[in-house]
Image (spheres, rainbow, N blue to C red):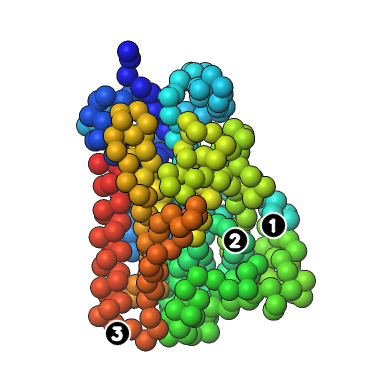
Amino acid sequence: QGRKNVVIVGGGAGGATVARHLAEKAGGAINITLIEDSEKYTTCFFSNLYLGGYRDFASITHGYDRLINDYGIRKVTARAEEIDRTAQQVRTSTGETIPYDRLVLSPGIDLIFDSVPGYSAELAEIAAHAWQAGPQTQLLKSKIDGLKNGDQVVMVAPPNPYRCPPGPYERVSMIAHTLKARGLTDCTIVVLDPKEKFSKQGLFAEGWEKYYPGMVEWYGPNIHGGIKGVDVEAGTVETDFDTFRGALLNIIPAQQAGSIAIGAGLSDDSGFCPVDAESMRSKRDQNIFVIGDASIAGAMPKSGSAANSQAKVVVMHLMADLMDMRVFPARYLNTCWSLVETNDGIKVGAQYGNVDGAIASTSSFISQPDESADVRRHTFEESVAWYDGITKDMFG
Ligand code: FAD
C-alpha cells in the first residue's frame, strides 16, 4: 500500500505551519504537497513595522527552500484552481491534477473590492489596500514616503470580520510615527470606520493622544453617517455627511474566504467556512480541513497567531486519520501585538478550547492603560521574539 497524500493549499501562516509540522511528525511516511502561487511569502504581520521604518522589506519576506530541501515537502508554485471533492483531487493553474487523502486549505482572504463603491483591484494600484502583503505594502510605503507637511491621509477601515482586528489602528500609529519622525506634524490621518468600536480602542486612543496629538482623527458611523464610496482619481472618500480629501488613500475593503474554499462549496452565507471546533475539519467535507482567515473559528480572531495554532491541531488530526496516532482535546492560542510608538507595544490574547461545540475563550489578557514604559518595552520585545518564533515555525 502506497503512502498517503496530504495536499495543502496556501503557504502562509496556516499552511506553511501544517506542512512543516506534519513533515516533522510523519518523518517521510506521508507525501506532503504544498500548493502556493508565490515564490516568496511576505508576512502581513510586522508589515506595519515596515511602513513605520522599523523593518526592511527583506526581513518580512521568507522563502520555502528549507521546507523543500530539509523537510522533503513538494512545493508546487501554481494556483489551485479547482477542487474535485468526489475524486479527491486538486487541479492547478499549470494543468496538474494532484490527488489527496486529506486536504488542508489555508488560502487566507479575498478582498471584496466593491464593498467600497468605486474601489476595484485595478484602482488598488493607485490607492493601496496593503491588506495582502507584498507589492501592495511597498506601494503604500512609497506613497507614505512621498507625503508633504500638511497632507491628509484617509484610511477606510474594514467591517467585521476581517484579518487582524487591531491591524488598521497599528497602521495608523506607524504612519503617524514616520510623519512625526520627518517633522511632518501638520499632517492628519483620518480614519473612516464602518464599525462603532474596534480592538484595543482605548489603548490606541491613549497612544495617539500621547504621541501624535492632533494628527489622528477617528470617525465611526455615528459621526460620518456611512461610507458611500471612493473616487480614487479625485482622491476623495464620500460619506453620508461629508467628503474627505486625501493626498493618500488607504482603502481596506470587506473580506471573505479565499476563492478556492468558496468555489469548493465549503463556505456558508458569511463568506467564510464553518469547521468543527475540535479539529478544524470542514463541516461540509470530512476529508478537508480549513484553517486561518478562511475559517469560522468561533471566538478566535483572524490572525497569523491563530492560524499557526490551528495548524497544530490539524496536524494532530492528520496523524490520527492517516497514521492512527492519538488525539488530545484541542487547545488554541492567540496573541495580537501592536506597536504604537518606538518601544511602546501593546497586546491582546487568549487561550481557547472546544466549549460545547464552539471555539470559545478559556482565559484572556490585554495590555492596560497607563502601563509603565518598561512594561510596554517588554511587550514590544516579546512581539519581536514572537515574530522570530512564528516565522521559524512556519519556514524552518
Ligand atoms: P495567509 O497567511 O494569507 O496565507 C494564504 C496563502 O495562500 C497566501 O500565501 C496566498 O498566496 C496563498 N493562496 C491563496 N489562494 C491560493 C490558491 N488558490 N492557490 C495557491 N495559493 C493560494 N496576525 C498576527 O498574528 N499578528 C500580527 O501582528 C498581524 N499583523 C497584521 C498586520 C496587517 C497589516 C495585516 C493585514 C494582517 C496582520 N495579521 C497579523 C494577520 C495575518 O497576516 C493573517 O491572519 C494570517 O496571515 C492568516 O493566515 P492564513 O494562512 O489564513 O493566510
Q: Nearer the viewer, mark 3 or mark 2?
A: 2
Which quarter of the picture shows residue 263?
top right
Callout 1–callout 2 Cβ contact below 8 Å:
no
- At a point 30% along the width and 56% down the height, the residue shown is 387
Residue 27 image-quadrant placement: top left
Judging from the image, what secondary structure is the residue with disc 2 in?
Answer: loop
Question: Would residue 236 be found to the left or right of residue 71 on screen?
Answer: right
Asked if ligand 1 lies within 8 A of label 3, the reply is: no
When the figure is inspected, residue 181 is found, relative to residue 18, above or below; the finding is: below
* Residue 278 spot, x, y in % from top left: 43, 47
Against 284, is 193 above or below?
below
**Residue at image coords 53%, 84%:** 214
Provide the residue designation for mark 1.
Answer: 116
Label 2 sits on residue: 160
Residue 376 shows in the view? yes
Estimate how packed mark 3 is, as few (under 14), some (14 to 19) or many (20 or more) residues with alpha carbons within 10 Å. few
- Mark 3 or mark 1: name the one nearer the start of the chain: 1
Q: Which SS class for mark 3?
A: loop
